[in-house]
Amino acid sequence: MIGELLICQHDPPVYTLGLREKLSIENENKLRDLGADVVKIRRGGLITVHSVGQLVCYPVINLHKINVGVRNYVKGLEASVVRTCTEFGLNAITNEHVGVWVGGAKVCAIGIQVSRSVSFHGLALNVCNELSWYEHIVPCGLKDKEVTTMEKILNRNIVVQDVSPVLIKHLTNQFNLSLK
């Protein structure tokens, strides 16, 4: 197996806590009281939220078989999202923080883990998700940074089903994957 792409939306919303996140039981319970799940997971990064309207992609790829190191893998994920956003008319960029940004606001979070050369976890591209879930956390540990959606920036309706095939195309091209 070289790889597979698992695409989904999370309903109910789920706050995921990366390896470096230290959240008190009291704060975890506050998030649960909002109607969301809270899950500690083994990926890089801190806390983020996944919900309906967000395109979550979990690439499961044997990086050894495609001859890509972890740093270049993350850069490849970012590049695939930038190209996806560009197809929808967004001026997306990367910067010193992992993820993809449009106009100073984060539109895509990335958090991965690699074990025995196989990647898991992945990326979350904000398409048309409700941003109020972010008001209860410091997303990715980045204080004073805005989170946005493609829909908000474009000022028009857009859904995950519109964006999924474009992202899949760019990921498969980036990593030279073939889909069944």
Image: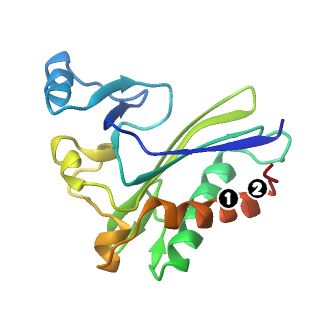
Q: Nearer the viewer, residue 161 or 141?
A: 161
Q: Secondary structure at mark 2?
A: helix
Q: Say whether residue 36 is left or right of residue 109.
A: left
Residue 79 vs 53, above or below: the answer is below
Tell me residue 82's x, y (percent): 54, 69
Mark pair 1, 2: CA separation = 6 Å
Characterize the local packing of mark 2: few (<14), some (14-19) or many (20 or more) Cα atoms within 10 angstroms. Answer: some
Residue lying farthest bottom?
89
The label shown at residue 171 is 1
Tell me residue 14's x, y (percent): 33, 34
Characterize the local packing of mark 1: few (<14), some (14-19) or many (20 or more) Cα atoms within 10 angstroms. Answer: many
**Could you tell me which residue is drawn at 50 percent across and 25 percent down?**
42
The label shown at residue 19 is none
Residue 95 vs 15, above or below: the answer is below
Q: Are marks 1 and 2 in contact (CB under 8 Å)?
A: yes
The residue identified by callout 2 is: 175
Task: Examine the rendering and report whether any part of residue 153 can be seen.
Answer: yes
Tell me residue 128's x, y (percent): 34, 61
The quadrant of the picture occupied by the N terminus is top right
**Could you tell me which residue is drawn at 36 percent across and 24 percent down?**
39
Q: Secondary structure at mark 1?
A: helix
Q: Quadrant of residue 61?
A: top right
Q: Quadrant of residue 5?
A: top right
Residue type at the position of mark 2: Phe
Q: Say whether residue 45 is left or right of residue 14.
A: right
Residue type at the position of mark 1: Leu
**What colour scheme does the image use?**
rainbow
Task: Examine the rendering and report whether any part of residue 79 can be seen.
Answer: no
